[in-house]
């Protein structure tokens, strides 16, 4: 029982990371219908830059902030490159984000090497009635709660948030109202960058990242987002947490080496099932 | 309907009517035939890899360029072919039989995963194929029977008959050239056939194609199976040629390399795939030579190739979406019309 509680808390924390990556994908997808393959890159770059900032002597908090801001700027840049003025098909934009993710490898390997880099997080361990939980996992959950409340407030209260929502619900209508849809797309990429950077600095202390960790991160983020149909943040959160918990339970009670495979299998089944459901409803999504 | 078919036929005739590409292909073929006899063994390996890349790229261009399905996990079918060849020949199956079976096993795997996966479209299909590759590589890395993450060493050479063994890089060079030519002939005939036109139609508008009577689902699956078979062929030759395979030989990056190749060459033509494979192979060789120059860190070749793949993909999609062949063709065409106007 105690063991189970430990697995659940770790799973929820890892799931929050997936949800954060997934929300970044959702933020971008809602406005642009582009799936951003470079989402994992934001996490890796954010984490790596934070680790360098800390080793340059910046205090905790500030060093991590530098990483997140850098990831946000990177997000804006990726958005600017992936969304052309003339407009290209979403799948072409997706391929551009693949290109940028691979190009980032060159930078990452050149500056930080190819070995996994860790980040000093909270090292302490919480113990109660025989359960030992690393405090970093609790921190991840706490920060995630704040972030998701912040996201909700941003999209329902702020002007930019409302404009982004307008673009996602009716891009033509938004343009008629004087909203620059491409610019909003770039801003969405920036937001995706911030969310990616946050997930990177939060996961790195418990799970060191190397340059090619981005593929697993983006696929798991996509997994979380896809469970929510790519458009709803709260569903992405739920999807991420479910995936994280399932992964931890598989690792705990069966075999750690199959956790990724099972999670990915769930995702493929979800997508296929969702597609079949849409087809039956007659609202085939021609994505 | 009848009129439409006639029109399409006329268009495809006028396209293939020009003699120039055929002439170019003939010269390329003669050069390719003669090249292995003058190359040293290191360059012969590059030649073999280029041909194998081209075989996979042609399959992927059928899938992406003609059928409009983006697969980010094409390397998985190369892996299936390579593992089939390696495992079967390790268990005493004649290598030639293992070689012939490899593409069929790749097709079988493609059939099993394709039926559910191909119900997905666009972004979802792209991620589905990527996830599939991660799953299969993960399973292979954890299965002792398949060599685990260490891979399978000492795969025997491919023996065409009991006495004729392919030993030298030169013989693999000719074999892979023959296979590429075969793959190109099959693909060209397919494109110019009725199913080929159906494929092109469904890439432009799936609903329209379905309304015009193209069996959309079946054709998408066929294109997927054929591209998997090509991957299987390339994988099998790769396994026999290198003698060693591991899950790392078929990374996600390899799948992305195939995408880069067909985008560089132009995804809407199978010749583009060949040009792309050729250009990328040469480029990677040049970068490797530069990266291993004195005084540079060991990771330099990798850094160079990541930067090249990534930036090329971005530049091509943004500025030359039809690939370099079409881009230069257009520039050349403009030049010749300009000079004609001067006259």
Image (spheres, coloured by chain):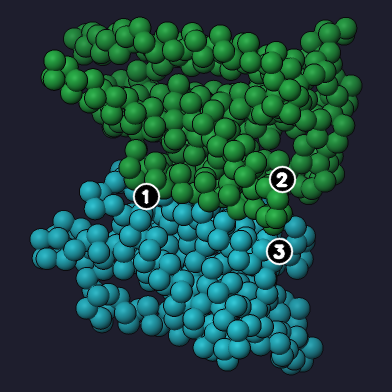
Chain colours: A cyan, B green
Regarding residue B117, the answer to whether it shows in the image is: no
- Residue A166, given in percent of the width and then of the height, sits at 21, 66
The chain to which mark 3 is attached is A
User: According to the image, label 2 marks what residue?
Assistant: B248
On-image quarter of the N terminus of chain A: bottom right
Name the residue: 51% across, 24% down.
B274
- Residue A130, given in percent of the width and then of the height, sits at 79, 88
Tag 1 or tag 3, which sits nearer the N-term? 1
Q: CA distance from mark 2 to mark 3?
A: 16 Å
Residues at discs 2 and 3 in contact (Cβ within 8 Å) = no
The chain to which mark 2 is attached is B
As helix, strand or loop, the secondary structure at mark 3 comes to loop
Name the residue: 69% across, 47% down.
B292
Q: Are marks 2 and 3 on the same chain?
A: no
User: According to the image, label 3 marks what residue?
Assistant: A115
Name the residue: 29% across, 32% down.
B205
As helix, strand or loop, the secondary structure at mark 1 comes to helix
As helix, strand or loop, the secondary structure at mark 2 comes to helix
The chain to which mark 1 is attached is A
User: According to the image, label 1 marks what residue?
Assistant: A93
């Amino acid at each position: 029982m105690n063991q189970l509680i430990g697995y659940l808390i770790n799973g929820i924390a890892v799931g929050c990371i997936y949800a954060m990556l997934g929300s970044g994908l959702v933020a971008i997808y809602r406005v642009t219908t582009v799936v951003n393959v470079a989402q994992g890159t934001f996490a890796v770059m954010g984490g790596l830059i934070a680790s360098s900032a800390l080793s340059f002597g910046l205090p905790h908090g500030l060093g991590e902030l530098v990483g997140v801001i850098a990831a946000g700027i990177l997000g804006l840049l990726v958005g600017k490159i992936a969304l052309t003025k003339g407009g290209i098909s979403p799948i072409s934009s997706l391929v551009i984000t693949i290109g940028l993710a691979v190009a980032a490898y060159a930078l990452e390997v050149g500056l930080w090497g190819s070995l996994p880099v860790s980040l000093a997080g909270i090292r302490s361990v919480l113990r109660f009635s025989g359960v030992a939980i690393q405090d970093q996992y609790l921190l991840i959950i706490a920060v995630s709660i704040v972030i998701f409340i912040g996201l909700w407030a941003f999209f329902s209260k702020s002007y930019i948030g409302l404009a982004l929502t307008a673009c996602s619900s009716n891009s033509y209508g938004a343009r008629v109202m004087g909203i620059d849809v491409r610019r909003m797309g770039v801003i969405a990429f920036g937001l995706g960058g911030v969310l990616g950077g946050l997930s990177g600095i939060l996961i790195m202390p418990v799970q060191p990242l190397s340059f090619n960790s981005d593929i697993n991160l983006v696929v798991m983020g996509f997994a979380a987002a896809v469970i929510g149909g790519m458009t709803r943040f709260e569903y992405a959160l739920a999807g991420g947490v479910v995936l994280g918990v399932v992964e931890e339970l598989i690792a705990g009670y069966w075999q750690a080496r199959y956790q990724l495979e099972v999670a990915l299998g769930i995702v493929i089944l979800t997508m296929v099932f969702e597609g079949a459901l849409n087809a039956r409803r007659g609202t085939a999504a021609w994505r | 309907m009848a009129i439409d078919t006639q029109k399409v036929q006329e268009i495809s005739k006028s396209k293939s009517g020009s003699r120039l590409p055929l002439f170019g292909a003939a010269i390329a073929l003669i050069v390719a035939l003669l090249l292995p006899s003058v190359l040293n063994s290191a360059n012969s390996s590059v030649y073999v890899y280029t041909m194998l890349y081209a075989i996979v790229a042609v399959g992927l261009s059928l899938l992406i360029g003609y059928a409009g399905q983006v697969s980010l996990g094409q390397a998985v079918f190369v892996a299936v072919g390579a593992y089939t060849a390696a495992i079967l020949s390790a268990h005493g199956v004649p290598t030639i039989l293992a070689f012939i079976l490899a593409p069929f096993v790749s097709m079988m795997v493609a059939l099993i995963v394709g039926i559910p996966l191909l119900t997905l479209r666009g972004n979802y299909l792209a991620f589905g194929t990527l996830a599939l590759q991660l799953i299969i590589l993960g399973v292979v890395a954890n299965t002792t029977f398949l060599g685990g993450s260490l891979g399978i060493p000492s795969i025997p050479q491919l023996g065409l008959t009991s006495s004729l063994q392919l030993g030298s890089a030169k013989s693999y060079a000719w074999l892979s050239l023959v296979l590429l030519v075969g793959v190109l002939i099959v693909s060209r005939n397919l494109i110019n056939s009725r199913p080929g036109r159906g494929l092109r139609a469904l890439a432009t508008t799936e609903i329209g194609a379905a309304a015009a009577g193209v069996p959309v689902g079946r054709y998408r699956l066929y294109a997927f199976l054929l591209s998997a078979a090509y991957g299987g062929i390339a994988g099998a030759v790769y396994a026999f040629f290198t003698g060693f395979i591991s899950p790392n030989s078929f990374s996600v990056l390899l799948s992305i390399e195939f995408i880069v190749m067909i985008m560089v060459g132009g995804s809407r033509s199978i010749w583009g795939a060949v040009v792309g494979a050729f250009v990328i192979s040469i480029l990677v060789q040049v970068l490797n030579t530069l990266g291993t120059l004195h005084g540079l860190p060991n990771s330099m070749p990798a850094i160079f190739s990541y930067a090249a793949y990534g930036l090329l993909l971005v530049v091509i999609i943004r500025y030359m979406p039809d690939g370099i062949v079409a881009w230069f063709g257009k520039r050349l065409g403009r030049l010749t019309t300009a000079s004609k106007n001067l006259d």
